Amino acid sequence: MSESTHLHHDHAATPSPAAFRLARAEGNERLRGSGELFESFFALDAAAYQAGALPVTTKELLGLVVSVMKDCEECVYYHLERCDEEGVGRDEVLETLQIALVAGGSVTVPLLRRAMSFMSQLPRLGAS
Amino acid sequence: MSESTHLHHDHAATPSPAAFRLARAEGNERLRGSGELFESFFALDAAAYQAGALPVTTKELLGLVVSVMKDCEECVYYHLERCDEEGVGRDEVLETLQIALVAGGSVTVPLLRRAMSFMSQLPRLGAS
Amino acid sequence: MSESTHLHHDHAATPSPAAFRLARAEGNERLRGSGELFESFFALDAAAYQAGALPVTTKELLGLVVSVMKDCEECVYYHLERCDEEGVGRDEVLETLQIALVAGGSVTVPLLRRAMSFMSQLPRLGAS
Amino acid sequence: MSESTHLHHDHAATPSPAAFRLARAEGNERLRGSGELFESFFALDAAAYQAGALPVTTKELLGLVVSVMKDCEECVYYHLERCDEEGVGRDEVLETLQIALVAGGSVTVPLLRRAMSFMSQLPRLGAS
Amino acid sequence: MSESTHLHHDHAATPSPAAFRLARAEGNERLRGSGELFESFFALDAAAYQAGALPVTTKELLGLVVSVMKDCEECVYYHLERCDEEGVGRDEVLETLQIALVAGGSVTVPLLRRAMSFMSQLPRLGAS
Amino acid sequence: MSESTHLHHDHAATPSPAAFRLARAEGNERLRGSGELFESFFALDAAAYQAGALPVTTKELLGLVVSVMKDCEECVYYHLERCDEEGVGRDEVLETLQIALVAGGSVTVPLLRRAMSFMSQLPRLGAS
């Protein structure tokens, strides 16, 4: 492999779910250890996604659409993983991404391409 | 009423749902009449919110959270009205706004204040 | 007119071009008088829109589409006025707004409604 | 005053500090009463601006620049008021707005015009 | 090549046009196959960039400036390629990027660096 | 190392400060050579961060928080480096990032993870 090749990351490539989970966990751990306010914010974030009047599945779809709208690539991967764990159906995810596309326009397309690529690696959503 | 007063719109005030509906309808009509592409886009937007794997209620909550994240005040009012029409519960709306707040941070607060004010004027969500 | 009415600004209403021009000029004057860096920035901004390899008309359309994408209402009005002054055709403006809509999605619609409303007040673009 | 006039809010006008404070307080009160998560978020937000390694004055300038970058008009007014209360100098505020302008570009100008207009109404920053 | 090196993608590096085209085409194909709405959106997007009152070259420059403003790296590469194919001049591209810089401020600089790097690899724009 | 592996850049990895500095300098040089307006903009940007009523350290923290709010990864690295050079304390940086988190919400977390990772490589901020 040439020097010049390895410097160019593939712009359609996405991390493996396992690699992503590990890197995310390490990074969050570092933040949590950097001050009480970070710790409190993470707790608040977790609370917002707990089941309440809305089920966890709906909340994860809300988190997913938010992540696309804010162009937050790693947030998209995280909520796709959570959707997979909670048994959200593939069609439900696709309809959510369609709302993101119509609401956010063509500038969301590159992130939607990555979302589809990441989703294809997930045990349930990738198999369906 | 003094000249200087009426120039300052109240930054917490929100339009009445009736006035908003009328102004929005007129503006959309004008856009629709300004080229086929506008018309096609509106059709696509409507299609994205039709019932499918996800019920209309969930899609309207997706539209609501998107609107807060993109700081689109009139989009927020529109989706709150649609939630009201579709019988979405007040607690479901509030949990959706909480996800918006945690995901989008304190800069979403002014729009959340307006959302609450507008919601208080809606027949069902305002009464509950 | 009741107190409660005048506090609610009409969300489809747009300023008159004359009122907008005056308020904008006063505000810019105040910024220019507040430090050399403001003055220099305004000069740089003016330079970017001068005729060069691209004609002024194309540059004003670039400024217009940028303004929609950044949800900058007053920037939209300004570039519409400049388009009007430079004799840009109504169809050219509409095609530019269509690109903004497809690129930025449905969250751009409220600002596009205002753009249409403001444009209808302009001497050339409003008459055509 | 004609009907058509009062519907057009002056796009360079800003609320009076007193009116703004009242509307903001009422809106925040409503949010705080709408669920524990809102209350917790407000507490976290307040904690972030407490004196620590950085003095309150610097933190308010950080809040101000953030508010311009996120195009949050009411956030700008709030942090200008806090700067005024904490005795931040006018030149310090102006240099902060200059960083916002250079970092965020010409699309920040309309909000900077409003910031200057609001600031002129503040007891200390407006007098200097 | 060490493990630690290959994990760090070069932050100034850009994909080769050929690799980018391939990855983009595959990703879009996947989206198109995931629901009628995606297909319809792509058709609408293509329609917006067809020649009309404005020539294709101007529309591609509009697409380019939009892409910088929305910080959409792959959109920038796509519209640069289209500009290259349509024979847009290098100076026209540079003046468009200058408007993006002044309008969007210094936070656009990293993407402009990548745009310049990608452009240098294009057959016409890179040679001039 | 497999082909498929090296295409996936580690989403928590950050460039080394030395590699980043080099790539950034080369890219900026290319922009500066592409037109007078780029050159003038860089000069204006440099002027905004000069010591004035506010010390350089405060201005670099303003630049840092702006960079997080605009999701500008390379801007974050640049201002962290400048903070390191100017002797800004680690706690001052952390409090600035906390304001960014509360103001911008959970969608800023991925960039904050990278900021922490990059900071750990800096001579002063990484050692403390």
Image (cartoon, coloured by chain):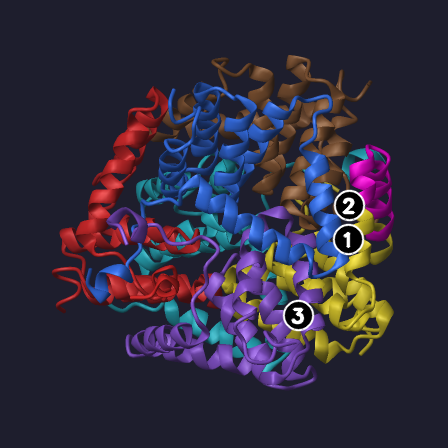
Chain colours: A brown, B blue, C purple, D red, E yellow, F cyan
Tell me residue D44's x, y (percent): 31, 31
In this view, B39 is above or below C117 = above
| Most foreground residue, E25 or C23 | C23
| Residue type, numbered disc 1 | Asp
| Chain letter of disc 1 in the image | E
| Residue type, numbered disc 3 | Val
**Which residue is rendered at x = 44% and y = 40% of the image?**
B17
Disc 1 from disc 2: Cα separation: 6 Å
Magenta highlight range: E20-40
Residue under label 1, please give it.
Answer: E45
Residue under label 3, please give it.
Answer: C93
Mark 1 touching mark 3, by CB under 8 A?
Answer: no
Disc 3 from disc 2: Cα separation: 22 Å
For disc 1, the neighbor class at 10 Å (few under 14, some 14 to 19, many from 20) is: many
| Residue type, numbered disc 2 | Phe
Tell me residue A59's x, y (percent): 55, 22
